[in-house]
Amino acid sequence: MQHNGRVLEMTREEFEELVAEALDRIPPELTRLMDNVAVFVEDEPPADDPELLGLYEGTPLTERGEWYAGVLPDRITIYRGPTLRMCETREDVVAESEVTVVHEIAHHFGIDDERLHALGYG
């Protein structure tokens, strides 16, 4: 994809709206299974990984045992800066956010990147 050097301008609020839109497009059979997960938007990822679009932090469903109770929700964080830098339109942002969120939800389900690629999620 050719990038014209212009970064898509978007406020945090607008970006959060698009991420919410992306979440709405995720198949309900996926979101129904999500348990104790919160989605956040941050402006920039950790300095050691400036290209990071999303991050999953928590305990995958596959690893939750008897002890899993009263813990903080898993966190899925979507990073606004890198997403906007690689997208040219609002529609790109929604599509990219959707893929990123699905990616991180997959980690919540204990699905690794390899399996995700096999399922067609880049």
Image (tube, helix red, strand yellow):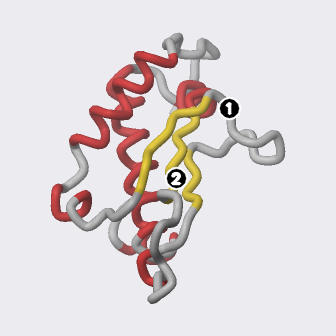
Q: Is residue 28 above or below residue 78?
A: below
Few, some or many residues within 10 Å of mark 2 (<14, 14–19, 20+): some
Farthest residue toward the front? 70
Rounded to the nearest angstrom, the CA distance separating label 1 from label 2 is 16 Å
* Pointer 1 residue: 44
Secondary structure found at label 2: strand
State the residue at coordinates (38%, 55%).
Answer: 102
Q: Which amino acid does label 1 sit on?
A: Glu
Can you give x and y, in whole percent of width and height, for residue 122 in the image? Answer: 45, 58
Could you say which is closer to the camera, residue 70 or residue 108?
70
Can you give x and y, in whole percent of width and height, for residue 83 in the image? Answer: 54, 33
Secondary structure found at label 1: loop
Q: Is residue 58 above or below residue 82?
A: below
Which tag is nearer the camera, tag 1 or tag 2? 2
* Pointer 2 residue: 75
Q: What residue type is labelled 2?
A: Arg
Can you give x and y, in whole percent of width and height, for residue 91 in the image? Answer: 32, 26
